[in-house]
Image: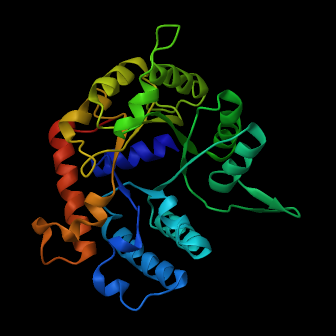
Amino acid sequence: MIDALIDKIIDMQNPTCVGLDTSFEYLPDEMREDIATFEGVAERIIEFNMNIIDKVCDIVPAVKVQVAYYEMYGYEGLRAFDYTVNYAGGRGMTVIADCKRNDIGSTAGCYSKAFIGETSVNGKIMRPFPADMLTVNGYLGTDGIKPFTDDIKKHDKGIFVLVKTSNPSGSELQNLKLENGKYLYEQMGDLVAEWGKDLIGGYGYSEVGAVVGATHPVEAANLRKRLPSVFFLIPGYGAQGGNAEMLKVCFDGRGLGGIVNSSRGIICAYRDPKYSGMSYADAARAACVDMQQDLSNVIGRMGR
């Protein structure tokens, strides 16, 4: 899966991921009128997401669908999540389910089946939420990761493990120094590399990647040097304060090594005066073009 994602990034010359963190409140006013049920919310979110996907799928390689924005609308919200995952995949995009799942091994196995594996019902095999990649919390250690790596091998999927997150207070834990002299985020990064050492693709990157925030360039530079085989999912660009100059340290000499997520900066672009007069879908596409140019100016050409 990681090679397929990198192929798309190279072909489009675009390491951008559109974050479909689609709160009902982010929709245009006219789409929110006369809605008073979760069913109505779900229908509008599906319509909104479909139109954005249709507008950007030819220039953007991936979407990241954050499940929390759907779970808060109950069963109907999860229906919208499911529809979005399937629709984006059907339009040829790599789909990252942003769910940050994990637990003890047996429960982790259930999470893995839900998003990157398969579930059997009386011998019939089905895929519940057919994502290509999944964000995972690795702080339960190796036994919580093994069910995911087993499904990666079986189904050609991928995961991104939380290593250095983009939120400001992440440093309260992730930058603690351990008895062995490492920072906690370094220890987690080393574990990620170990978990993925047998899953490295043709570009030299593993199916077990890391979440590394754009808002912490010093730590990101350290991790890029420390983890040459680990592909980064990079949140924090745009609305969270990260910029292209800050995140360029996440990429290798070929312009590869990461994919940069932007959520509100794209799906809410229609509210930006820069894109005044555009529909929300046209504004999202224009924001993606601007982001691609911004990243390319700093990262350079992405090549094999």
Q: Residue at x 64, y 28 (%)?
A: 141
Q: Can residue 204 be seen in this view?
A: no
Residue 215 position, x and y percent, is 29, 37
Residue 36 position, x and y percent, is 47, 87
Is residue 112 shown left or right of residue 224?
right
Q: In which quarter of the image is the C terminus?
A: top left
State whether residue 196 is above or below residue 244: above
User: In the rendered image, which quarter is residue 30 located in?
Assistant: bottom left
Q: Which residue, as the protein is rendered here, is positioned at the far right?
A: 122
Is residue 222 shown left or right of residue 210?
left
Residue 166 position, x and y percent, is 36, 39
Q: Which of 125 and 227 is in front in this view?
A: 227
State whether residue 243 is above or below residue 83: above
Residue 169 position, x and y percent, is 38, 36
Q: Nearer the viewer, residue 23 or 153?
A: 23
Q: Which residue, as the protein is rendered here, is positioned at the far bottom?
A: 34
Q: How is the image coloured?
A: rainbow
Q: Residue at x 55, y 48 (%)?
A: 134
User: In the rendered image, which quarter is residue 267 located in?
Assistant: bottom left
Q: Residue at x 24, y 58 (%)?
A: 288
Q: In the rendered picture of this protein, how many numbered marks are placed on residues?
A: 0
Q: Can residue 259 be seen in this view?
A: yes
Is residue 5 shown left or right of residue 295?
right
State whether residue 229 is above or below residue 75: above
Is residue 176 shown left or right of residue 239?
right
